[in-house]
Amino acid sequence: MFHRWVRPALATIDERLVAGGFLLSDDHRRRIRWVGFLMLGVAVLGLVRVLAEIAQARSVGPLVTALLAVTAVGVVQVTTAPRRTRRGNRALAALRDRHRALAPERAPDWQLHGPADAALGIGLFGTKALAAAAPGFAREVAPQVAATGGNGRARLAVSGGGGGDRGGGNRG
């Protein structure tokens, strides 16, 4: 999705954020998803058990409740392995609070703030800030993001560049 000249810079930023404890590594996220798949395997066994209990005309209420809970947790882990750590979430929240004047809902005056603050606002608040800072550019980019299947959100960058809200927050 990113231009080949940009990828090395993004990889360097990503490595720094992982090393600093702000982002989870790809390996860590894979392990989270693996645990989710294991839980779904347990859910399949639970379903077999429910069917066996039904065949014997036994009560299955508590078993179904447990099965639904295990399935829900497994699906969440498989589909939304977090990108940011708790430390990353706290850092992003602190930066958003510190620079709340750049939030798109506050309609910042970009002539007053200038391009550096516009970039920071986009990095902290995502594509809504892009639409507020550069509506023409946002209209041009939006169809490209939709066509590539992108989520329209950029990466967290505590070091001052990059993006706002990629990954589903933190679940562990």
Image (cartoon, grey):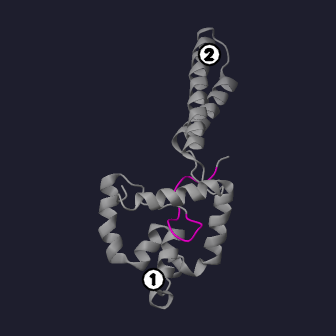
Left or right: 172 in relation to 30: right
Magenta: main secondary structure: loop
Residue closest to the eye, 108 or 94? 94
Give the residue furthest to the bottom.
112
Q: Does the magenta run of residues contain 164? A: yes
Look at mark 2 in the image and give the residue it sits on. 49
Stretch in magenta: 157-170
Look at mark 1 in the image and give the residue it sits on. 115
Q: Residue at x 62, y 16 (%)?
A: 49
- Please state, as top left, top right, bottom left or bottom right, where the N terminus lies in the image: bottom left
Assess disc 2: are there few (<14), some (14-19) or many (≥20) residues with their C-alpha within 10 Å of its C-alpha: some
Q: Is residue 47 visible?
A: yes
Amino acid type, callout 1: Pro
Q: Nearer the viewer, mark 2 or mark 1?
A: 1
Amino acid type, callout 2: Arg
x, y percent for residue 138: 36, 71
